[in-house]
Amino acid sequence: MPIFRLSPPFLAGSSRVTLHMIQVLLALIPAVIAMVYFFGPAVLINIVIAVVAALVSEALMLKLRSRPLKPFLSDGSATVTAVLLAIAIPPLSPWWLTVIGVSFSIIFAKHLYGGLGYNPFNPAMIGYALLLISFPVEMTTWLPVNNLADQAPGWLASLQVILTGQYQGMAMDAFSGATPLDHMKTQISMMRSPEYVASKPMYGLFGGLGWEWINIWFALGGLWLMYRKIISWHVPMAMIGGLLAISTITWLIAPQVSGSPLFHLVSGGFMLGAFFIATDPVSGSTTLRGRIVFGAGVGVLVYIIRVWGGYPDAVAFAVIMMNMLVPLIDYYTQPKVYGAR
Amino acid sequence: MRSPVSDFPGGLHLPGHKKRSTQTPIHKTPISKQLILPLQQHIGEAAVPIVDVGDLVLKGQRIARAEGHVSVCLHAPTSGKIIAIEERPIPHPSGLSAPCVIIETDGEDNWLERHPVADFRQLSAHEIRQIVRDAGIVGLGGAGFPSFIKLNPGVHHSVDTLLINGAECEPYITCDTMIMRERAEGILDGIEIMRYALNAGEVIIAIEDNKPASISAMQLALAARPQWQNVDIVVIPTRYPTGGEKQLIQVVTGKQVPSNGLPIDIGIVCHNPGTAYAVCRAVKYGEPLISRIVTVTGTDVKHCGNFETLFGTPISDLLNFCETKRQPDEPFIQGGPMMGYSLAGDQLPITKTANCILVGVEDVAPANEPLPCIRCGDCADVCPASLLPQQIYWYSRAKEFDTTRDYKLFDCIECGCCDYVCPSKIPLVSYFRFAKTEIMNQEREQRKSDLARERHESRLERLERERLEKEQRQAQRKAALEASKKAAANKEKAAPADNATETESPAEEKN
C-alpha cells in the first residue's frame, strides 16, 4: 500500500536539502584545490578538523535538544558551515582555533537559535567573527603563497604546526605573514601609494599573487551553483556590483585611499563571501528584490570596513550586519502579487 | 488560431503521464447494480429529494430539486427503483457521510421522454439558464459550481470573452483531452449556446500544446463553421498551473483578475469543455447531466482510459472494470495529483466533480517528517501568484494570522507548486489551508460575539427602558393614587356617610 500524504499535492520534485548542501560542497572543490596548491595540505587538515568538530557539536546539540540525529546530521548543513569556516581561517591555524570557531558556530549561532532554518545570523561568519575578535594574531597570519616561500609546508610539517604550533623548533611566525589585503592596508597607512604597493612581488595581475586565482575559482564554483539553480544570481551580482560601485567612485575621486576596484574584487574572502556565504538562504533575504538589497549592502560594507575600518577583511562583519536587516528588507520588498490593485 | 499574449510567473514543467490514458477511445462503464447519488454534488445548497423509497424512476427523471439560488437539480442516471434515501459516505477528503438517494438499477436503461430544442435561438437567455439549471449542470472541471449562474452576466457586467478552459494542466488527467478529441462538434454546439446566453463578444478556446490531437479535432470542427465570428483556438505552452482560471486569463488575455474579484469583473467568463458539451446535450437533446467522463489512470491501473460513467457508480466498480492492483480500502486520489484529494472506502460514488480517479503515481510525495524551512525561496520562484510561501508558512506556523494576510495568504490558489519544489518537503499548502480555515473561523467567531454583544446590549437597553417605563408608570399611579386620595379626602370631608361602603371593598377583594 503506498504511503502518501493525506492532503495534496501528492507529487514531489527531486529537490532535497541534502542535495543542495552536497552541491555547495562540490562547488567549493576547485577553489580548495587552488588553496592547497598555494598554501599546502594544511587547508585539508583544517577542513577535516572542522568537519569532525561540527558533526560532534551538531550531534551533541541534537541530543540535548531531543531532536532526531539522522535527518539533521545527514542534511549536510553542519558540514557546509564547517568547510566554509575552515577555508576562511588561515591554513596553519592551531587546531583549537578551528575547534572553537566551529563549535561556537554550531552550538551558539545555530542550535541556540533553534537549529537548521532558524538561525538569524550566518553561523560560519559568527564563528569567524568570534575568532577574529578573540585571536586577532592567529587569525591574520596567513602563509605566503608557496612560490614566494621556499617551500609550502608538506603534510607532516602542516600537521605538526597545526597540532603543536611549532615546526622543528621554529614558531609559526617564521612561516607566515600578512595577507596582501592586510599588507596593502598597512602600507597605505604608511603613506605609500596603492600602485607602488601593488608592484611588490606578493601581488599578481589584479590582486595578491595566488589569492586572485583562489577568488576566481570560488567565483567559477559559484557560477556552477547558479547554473544548477542552487543559488540565484541576485546576491552575488548585487554584492559584486555594490563593491564595484563604491570602490570605483573612491578610486576615481581619491585613488590614494585604497587598491583598485579589481584588487578588492579578487582579494581576501570576497568571492567566497559573494557566492557561498552571503548566499546562505537561512540568514539572508528571501525575496528577490530583498536579495539585491542584501547583496549590495554586503558589498558596500565590505569595502567600507576594509578601507576605513579596523580589520583588513570584512566579509564576516558585513554579512552579519546585513543579517540584522533581513526581516526589515523582507517585509518591504514583497513582490506584487497576482491581481493586486 | 491565435497565440497567447502573455505569461504567468512561476509554474512547473511536470511530467504529464497523459499518454497512459489516451490510447483507447472513451468507453462506457457498465451500469452498476446500485447507484449512490449524493444530494449535494455541487457548490451551494444540497438538492431536496422529490421521490420516495419504493418509487420507480426512469433514466433522466428528476429525483431532487434545486433548493435556493446556488443549487441544481439531480436526476436518475438510469431506470430503476429508489431503495433508500439515507446517509452514505461521500467522496470527501474528511470521509464525511451525507444524504444520498440510492437506486437499484433494472438494467433496462429506459429514458423518460426528452424535450429537445431544435433552435435554441427561439429561447431567451433566461430560458436557457433555466434548462441548464434544471438539467443539473455544474462546472465539470472539478469545482462543481452551478453553471447557470456563470451563464448570467447580471445587470452590472457585460461579457467580452467566453473562455473555454481546455488546458487540463494537471498530470494524468485526460478527460477534457478526450472529450475535445471525440466530441468537438458537441462542444462547439454548447459553446454557441453559452455564447448566446452570455451575449459574449468573442470566444477563446485555450488548449495546452501537449494535446495536438485535441487541438486538431477542435480546429477541424471549427473550420466546418465558417460563419462563426470571433471564435479562436489559442494553443498555450504546457506549464502547470496554466489551467488555473486566473493564470489562463493572464496567459490568453494579458489581464489579471483583481484580488478578491471574479473574472466577470474584467468581462471574462470561463467554462470547461465538458460543461459546454453538457449544455449542448441539455438544450439540443433534452438530456440532463447524468454521467460524465472520468479518467481512470495511475501506475497501478491495468486498463487506463476515459470512461463515460453514470453518476452514483461505486468507484470500486469502475476500478474493477479497469483492473487495478489496488487492495480493498487502499487510498486512491480523486482529481489530479497536485490538487485532488485522497479517498479511502470502496462504496464511494462517482459524482459530478469526479474528473479523475488516480491509483498510484510516480514521484509520490513522502509522508515522513519534513525538515525545517531553509528559506531557499524556491517556492516563491514557482508561485504563479507571486506570493512568498516561505514567509506565509513561517507566520502560519507561528499562528500570526494577521501577518499571513499581509503576505496575501488569500491570493493563494493552492496549486501546490511550492510543495513540489520544497527541498525540505514541507506540506506548505496544508499550512495555508490551515491558516485560511483558522482566519475564517476567527471571523465567524468574531461575527458571533459581535452579534451576542449587540444582543446583550440591546437587552440591557430594553431592561433599562422597561425599568424607566415601570418607574414612570409607578410614579403616574402613585400620583393618581395620591390625587384620588386627595379627592377622596375632599369627598370625605364633603360626605362622611360614604365611609361604610369604602371599608367593605377590601373584604370583597379578598374573596
Image (cartoon, rainbow, N blue to C red):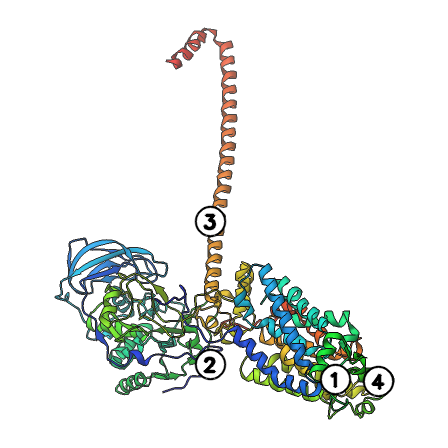
Does residue A251 appear left or right of residue B189 in this picture? Answer: right
Q: CA distance from mark 4 to mark 1?
A: 18 Å
Q: Separation of disc 4 and disc 2 at Cα?
A: 56 Å
Chain ID for label 1?
A: A
Task: Examine the rendered structure and indicate whether residue B70 appears above or below residue B425.
Answer: above
Numbered disc 3: secondary structure:
helix
| Residue B55: image location, x then y, percent | 15, 55
Tags 2 and 3 on a common chain:
yes
The chain letter for the residue carrying disc 3 is B
Whether the residues at callouts 1 and 2 have beta carbons within 8 Å, the answer is no
- State whether residue B17 appears in this view: yes
Q: Quadrant of the N terminus of chain B?
A: bottom left
Q: Amino acid at mark 4?
A: Gln
Which residue is denoted by mark 1 in the rendering? A247
Crowdedness of circle 4 by 10 Å Cα count: few (<14), some, many (20+)? some
Q: CA distance from mark 1 to mark 2?
A: 39 Å
**In x, y percent, where is residue B216?**
30, 86
**Label whose residue precedes the other's in the sequence (4 or 1):** 4
Residue beneath label 3, please? Answer: B448
Asked if residue B391 lies left or right of residue A274, the reply is: left
For disc 4, the marked residue is A187
Q: Amino acid at mark 1?
A: Ser
What amino acid does circle 3 point to? Lys
Closer to the eye: label 3 or 1: 1
Are there few (<14), some (14-19), or many (20+) residues within 10 Å of tag 3? Answer: few
Residues B308 and B226: in front is B308
- The answer for how far apart the CA atoms under marks 2 and 3 are is 43 Å
Q: Which chain is mark 2 on?
A: B
Secondary structure beneath dot 2 equals loop
Q: Residue furthest front?
A: A168
N-terminal-most mark, 2 or 3: 2
Cα–Cα gap, marks 3 and 4:
75 Å
